[in-house]
Amino acid sequence: MEQLLIDLKQRGDEDWLLGYDSREFTRRAVELYLHLKQKSHLNTPPKIILAERNPIKFIAGFIAAVAANCPVFLCNPDWVEAEWQQVFELVQPDLILGQEAENMSKLFNSRGKLNERFAGNTESLVKPAPTPITNYQLPITHSPIVIPTGGSSGKIRFAIHTWETLIASVSGFKQYFALKQVNSFCVLPLYHVSGLMQFIRSFTTGGLLVILPFKALELGDKTDINPAEYFISLVPTQLQRLLQKESKWLSKFETVLLGGAPAWAELLETARNYRIRLAPTYGMTETASQIVTLKPDDFLKGNHSCGQVLPHVNVTIRSRKGEILATKNTGIITIQSKSLFLGYYREKNQIETTFHPDDLGYFDENGYLHIIGRNSNKIVTGGENVFPSEVEAAIQSTNLVSDVCVIGLPDRYWGQVVTAIYIPKDPKLSTDILKTAIEHKLCKFKRPKYWFPVESLPRNAQGKVNREKLKKLSLGLIANASS
């Protein structure tokens, strides 16, 4: 890839990876690239699982795989055994980058849990001999970049992107914020689109990049930077924790991008009170991160939308019949974008030019998008529609719970009943207190019938809840209570 070659060469002698050795990244990327080219036989490059925990090894492996025209599957090194088995059987990789994934592969092979085509054919990628950086060339490539997306069901799916779709996202970001260079402070996982795009934005625009585990940030490791020159991306739970400890520091950032899961009203209002230059976003793995963003100045003025559409995207609101709806009419969000993924790996129904993410929303008269909720999560109780995000926001605003998820459970009389699974801040908190606290916030049919206190909710790194697990848990609790 010509542009990737130019970027890698130009950045070879720069100190742009703050806290790490930028030259080590370049050297490692080139060595891996040459090693991968040697592994390609009969124009069939190896299929790679990339699950490196070390950030430098991860991004070097990513660049090398893309440059060598290798299909690369980004994976979470912390996946458990059942998840790894699902991934190995789906991907059937030729090479593995990452110790945890390699160990899990060997474990499955020893147990005979993998099919014959895959078992025994995978090798780990050992470190090759050093090679002079000047002696390499990178080809033009459209290699698949396959990114995990689990949604709320817990099932791992892989969305297929290319370097071109990811760069389209970068171009739209730059144009929307009127930037030439993007400096990023990354505390999100690199295997996820939210972390990966921060690296790509900084790498391809000549920007600076800080990669820091969120736990290290919470412990006070902020790196010696001027926050006013950086973008930082957070999910709502991270924002909540930083507001409690580092609100002054966070308020210095040029922009604080917020995405991954819906933020509750009280959290957004607290951010405004601290003058955080927040930019709530709407996007997903399938669109290579954000496609709609609220600019910080609009947020601080009290705008409650998701923002306006980025230049590389076309978003319309449609009826169930596919008709485009006028402003202020709620309908199905429909997306067309240069950054749109090519489909899900090994699934028959491939995406072509339009994507329906199952979200409902509307545009106001000023072109700002408002998200109502997910169509599939909508609860229909007694003929009335209830959107979990509204109920969750009302419960969060009581300041009596640290986390909550609202789901619909089947009911013979009502069709579905609203159910809240929550983590109380005080273990002695009674349900009656919670019920009273939301009486003036929600009309009667929106108030939960069942309330289940739990110690934790099954959320992924981006804050999305596994609703299927919660439904099974809740039905089990109801069955036990009635037996």
Image: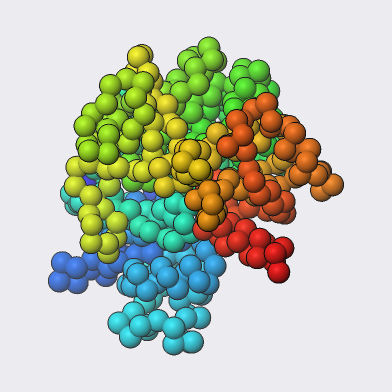
- Its colouring scheme is rainbow
Residue 2 position by quadrant? top left
Q: List the single residue furthest toward the front.
A: 413
Q: x, y (%) of residue 73?
A: 36, 60
Kindly tell me whether residue 354 is visible in this rendering: yes
Residue 336 to residue 61: above or below: above
Q: List the single residue furthest toward the right.
A: 428
Q: Would residue 129 be found to the left or right of residue 397 on screen?
A: left
Rendered residue at 48%/67% (across/down): 83
Kindly tell me whether residue 460 is visible in this rendering: no
Q: x, y (%) of residue 254?
A: 52, 21
Residue 127 position by quadrant? bottom left
Rendered residue at 48%/38% (across/down): 384
**Which of 157/455 is in front?**
455
Q: Quadrant of the C terminus?
A: bottom right
Q: State the count of labels.
A: 0
Residue 377 to residue 53: above or below: above
Q: x, y (%) of residue 307?
A: 41, 23
**Which of 359/162 is in front?**
359
Rendered residue at 42%/70% (across/down): 86
Q: x, y (%) of residue 144?
A: 26, 55
Q: Would residue 171 be found to the left or right of residue 429 on screen?
A: left
Q: List the single residue furthest toward the left.
A: 42
Rendered residue at 68%/48% (across/down): 451
Residue 287 to residue 78: above or below: above
**Which of 134/70 is in front?**
70
